[in-house]
Image: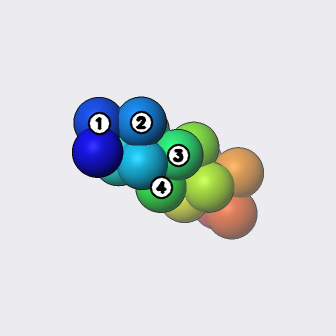
Amino acid sequence: MLLQLEHCLCLKLVHY
């Protein structure tokens, strides 16, 4: 679950 959260954060960072 923690990995998923980090993945979401990474995607958000890449998106912006």
Tell which tag, 4 or 2, sits nearer the viewer.
Answer: 2
- Between the C-alphas of marks 1 and 2, the distance is 4 Å
Residue 16 visible: yes
Residue 8 is tagged as 4
Disc 1 marks a residue whose amino acid type is: Leu
Q: Looking at the figure, which quarter contains the C terminus?
A: bottom right
Disc 2 marks a residue whose amino acid type is: Leu
Element at badge 2?
helix
Instruction: Mark 1 or mark 3: name the one nearer the start of the chain.
Output: 1
Q: Which residue is mark 3?
A: 7
- Between the C-alphas of marks 4 and 2, the distance is 9 Å
- Between the C-alphas of marks 4 and 1, the distance is 10 Å
Instruction: Mark 4 or mark 2: name the one nearer the start of the chain.
Output: 2
Q: Which residue is mark 1?
A: 2
Element at badge 3?
helix
Mark 4–mark 1 CB contact (< 8 Å): no
Label total for image: 4
Mark 1–mark 2 CB contact (< 8 Å): yes
Q: Which residue is mark 2?
A: 3
Residue 15 picture location, percent across and down:
68, 63
Q: Looking at the figure, which quarter contains the N terminus?
A: top left
Disc 3 marks a residue whose amino acid type is: His
Q: Residues within 10 Å of mark 4 (few under 14, many from 20)?
A: few
